[in-house]
Amino acid sequence: MRKVLSAAVVILWALPVFAADSPAMAPRPLVMADAVAIALEKNNDLAALREELKGSQTVTELTGTLPNPVLELEGTSGTLTNSPDEKSLGIALSQEIPLMPVGSRRKAVARAEADLLQTQLLDQERQLADQTRRAWLEAVLSAQRLELARSQKTLADELVSVAKTRFQAGDLPEFEVQLAELDHRRSSLRTLEAATGTEAARRKLAQLLGFGADNQLPPLAPVPALPGVIPAEDELMASAFERRPDLAGKQREGEREQASLALAKAEAVPSLTVALSYRNERSNQNAYELSGGVLLPGKERTNDHILGLKLSIPLPLFSRNQAEIARVTARASSVRYRQEAARRAIRLEVRDLLAQYRLATSTLALHHTTLGPIARENLHIQHQAFQLGEIGMQTVLDEKRRLGEQQEAELAALQTAHETYSRLESAVGGSLAMTGDKQ
């Protein structure tokens, strides 16, 4: 189902390319979910892993058959040893028959390998989805930082203009004009740095989505609103333990080792080999016959047909597959420790991300409701006071710097909140909304 949805998203994004000559059709903004779908569809590493999974599933279907029978043909002749009358022809067919269900256990190992590869594919998709969400968020917020830098530069332009006007009127000393010009240069530099950061973020996103260059990216949609309520910690923990593909991979790994152990024990029992043979022998033997009271030498031709049955089995006196059994037993025991370590790591990861998300949302709410409005109002008041000649340039520049720092801190809080939410979704193995509905 995910493949069908991803392919549909890619086709929808390809439609504006074919209609590029039509000015009426503009590409719709790229939202975060569509970016993730495109990345999952066009990622080469995932495509290679899907091909490996297909091959592993094919191996599962073909594994478990009996060993091939052995056909033996034999012919002998005594022509080169001065026995031209000695000839024989033989044919034999042998088949190895396992005394234990080795074939079915090999199939179980192959099936466990395919299941493990499936969980690895799901885990890589989970990690790529989180990486794409964060790259999309970085590209969108970098554009917002560029807009803030440009607004700061516009304000710096206004301050320079007002400062020069007041200087020409003799109402402002020259060093305050120089302060305004210095702030203008700093604003220009910050704008250039923001533009460079925006281009880098777009290039990273374009690479993840499989576009040739960042200019091929469609317009990006605004950052979505954060959810008001997320599930409780115990619900997130339960969802992570149930849906995390890497934890499921540890379980599949344990199943594979148990299947490998059963196979190693079955291979310790030797197989029986049954052989059926047919042999035709032709020869001449010296013979004597009595004629007139005299023994006369002669030859007697023989033609023998021989059928044979042969049973053979190795005697497990020196090797009973002890090394392989010991190796697989050790691996099966170690899986339990890795499973417990993974559960502890997931528990800590979910708890830490939940605390970080709550802190980030509280910080963001403080910026929205208090810090941001106060900083903007203070700058507005100081700017008006400067225009009226009530305060100096340095006071306005300090307030302008405080507003810039506040706006950057607000964007950082917004980015941290969304990135932490994305990481939390990745940590629980799926959508947090689905976690709440499920519980």
Image (cartoon, helix red, strand yellow):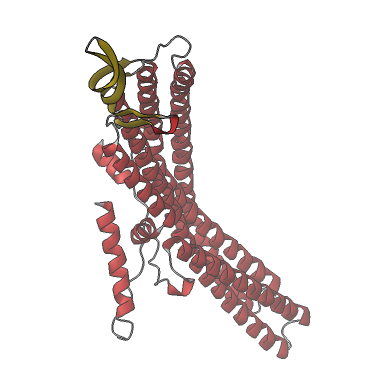
Quadrant into which the C terminus falls = top left
User: In the rendered image, which quarter is residue 77 located in?
Assistant: top left
In the image, residue 418 sits, relative to residue 187, either above or below, namely above
Residue at (61, 81) in percent of width and height? 157
Residue 364 as seen in the image, left or right of residue 274: right
Task: Report if residue 398 is visible in the image.
Answer: yes
Residue 175 as seen in the image, left or right of residue 258: right
> Which of these two is toward me, 149 or 162?
149
Task: Report if residue 388 is visible in the image.
Answer: no
**Whole-percent x, y for residue 338 in the image:** 47, 27
Residue at (45, 25) in percent of width and height? 335
Residue at (45, 19) in percent of width and height? 333
> Which of these two is toward me, 138 or 146?
138
Residue 104 as seen in the image, left or right of residue 356: left
**Whole-percent x, y for residue 78 in the image:** 39, 29
Residue at (56, 61) in percent of width and height? 408
> Which of these two is toward me, 111 or 98?
98
**Whole-percent x, y for residue 317 in the image:** 45, 9
User: In the rendered image, which quarter is residue 98 located in?
Assistant: top left
**Whole-percent x, y for residue 436 in the image:** 28, 40
